[in-house]
Image: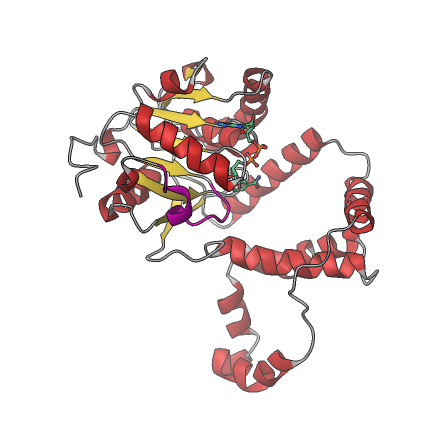
């Protein structure tokens, strides 16, 4: 592969990161990289993007201070640029977090590829598009990888890293190492699976939840409670596999499979996506407003952030304070 053969900064030596697209996820990445001590440039075409981004960073900062900032970390090390080209001109890593539309991603990744210095890896935050489908227009597709985060990227450690058919495996290795240095937990996938790992699982749960609302089988509040007061508590400690192994008692997973395996065929799940018609849309939106119980989105963000920090602390998984 030729794309990465020009000198590439070692993951440990990266100091300057560019974030392109600065909404919920791009803004969350900006906050994360700033807290880890990087210089960050950001670009987003929305007229109110800079104000929105700075509000997001300001709102996240107390949580990040609480967690422990890297030496020299400062929100003042953010520069919002007027053009995409300026944002990436001196970047040593680029994180793309634009809207989840395939044509837009294709075109944007090609533009980023053209504007980013040679040998620099460009990662997409896509929630599920395979890189093979997004890298079609790029001149040097070898440097393009998926780096799929979870909201908010400044608190949830996981990033799923995977390349496309034309990605240089070295770019995948480089990105995985860079995210680790930047304080993330990384799963490197050796093949493209639609939805990667975690979103494939989340999607199954989400479809079932929408079916239950559509059919009047459960309210939005009941669905949320069923997880936060139930399996969700265990999932922060152990994933669904080890959790179920314990459901088998002393016999572990083998007993669990003997006992409950046959019920896998019981007709519990629907799994085909429900029709997202107006009635379902309205029921889910109204249900969320009711479940929020007067709390604003900003209130809920603060509550979630504190809760995630408490869980990370309680389980000994606070992110490392290292970074740039
Ligand atoms: N929201 C989540 O929980 C979540 C989680 C993981 C990954 N993602 C992925 O992250 C990406 C961004 O999602 P989001 O939730 O932050 O969306 P968002 O709508 O909050 O933000 C998208 C931002 O992109 C900007 N934008 C529009 N056109 C652009 C362009 N041509 N170039 C650059 N920026 C552009 C918008 O102005 C907006 O600020 C998507 O690929 C999404 O699938 C989202």
Residue at point 47%, 48% (across, down)? 129
Find residue 273 and report its image quarter: bottom right
Quarter containing the C terminus: top left
Indicate how the structure is coloured in the image.
secondary structure
Helix, strand or loop: magenta stretch: loop
Find residue 275 and report its image quarter: bottom right
Q: Is residue 138 visible?
A: yes
Regarding ligand 1, which quadrant of the image does it lie in? top right
Q: Is residue 261 above or below residue 155?
A: below
Q: Is 284 part of what is drawn in magenta? A: no
- Give the percent coordinates (x, y) of residue 297: 70, 32
Residue at point 60%, 17% (across, down)? 48
Quarter containing the N terminus: top left
- 59 displayed left or right of 174: right
Observer-nearest residue: 99 or 104? 104
Residue at point 55%, 21% (across, down)? 53
Residue at point 79%, 51% (across, down)? 280
Observer-nearest residue: 247 or 41? 41
Q: Is residue 154 visible?
A: no
Q: Is 135 part of what is drawn in magenta? A: yes
- Give the percent coordinates (x, y) of residue 88: 35, 22
**Which residues are the magenta region?**
126-137
- Give the percent coordinates (x, y) of residue 29: 46, 31
Find residue 17 and report its image quarter: top left
- Give the percent coordinates (x, y) of residue 45: 52, 20
Q: Is residue 112 above or below residue 49?
A: below
How many numbered marks have been drawn onto this rendered protein structure? Answer: 0
- 111 displayed left or right of 57: left
């Amino acid at each position: 592969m030729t794309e990465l053969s020009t000198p590439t900064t070692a993951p440990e030596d990266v100091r300057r990161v560019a974030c392109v697209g600065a909404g919920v996820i791009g803004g969350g990445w900006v906050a994360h990289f700033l807290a880890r001590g990087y210089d960050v440039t950001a670009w987003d075409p929305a007229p109110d993007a800079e104000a929105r981004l700075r509000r997001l960073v300001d709102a996240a900062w107390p949580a990040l201070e609480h967690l422990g900032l890297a030496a020299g970390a400062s929100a003042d090390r953010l520069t919002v640029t007027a053009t995409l080209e300026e944002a990436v001109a001196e970047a040593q890593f680029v994180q793309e977090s634009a809207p989840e539309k395939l044509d837009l991603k294709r075109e944007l990744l090609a533009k980023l590829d053209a504007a980013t210095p040679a040998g620099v890896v460009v990662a997409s935050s896509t929630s599920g598009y395979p890189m093979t489908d997004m890298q079609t227009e790029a001149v040097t597709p070898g440097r393009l990888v998926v780096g799929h985060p979870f909201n908010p990227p400044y608190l949830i450690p996981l990033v799923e890293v995977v390349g496309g058919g034309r990605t240089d495996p070295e770019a995948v290795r480089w990105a995985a190492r860079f995210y680790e240095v930047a304080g993330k937990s990384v799963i490197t996938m050796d093949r493209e699976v639609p939805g990667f790992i975690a979103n494939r699982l989340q999607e199954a749960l989400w479809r079932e939840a929408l079916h239950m609302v559509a059919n009047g089988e459960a309210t939005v509040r009941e669905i949320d409670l069923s997880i936060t007061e139930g399996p969700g508590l265990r999932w922060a400690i152990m994933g669904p596999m080890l959790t179920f192994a314990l459901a088998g008692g002393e016999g572990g997973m083998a007993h669990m499979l003997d006992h409950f395996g046959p019920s896998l065929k019981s007709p519990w799940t629907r799994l085909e996506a429900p029709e997202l018609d107006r009635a379902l849309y309205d029921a889910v939106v109204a249900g969320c407003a009711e479940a929020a119980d007067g709390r604003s989105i900003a209130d809920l963000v603060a509550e979630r952030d504190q809760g995630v920090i408490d869980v990370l602390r309680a389980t000994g998984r606070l992110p490392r304070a290292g970074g740039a």
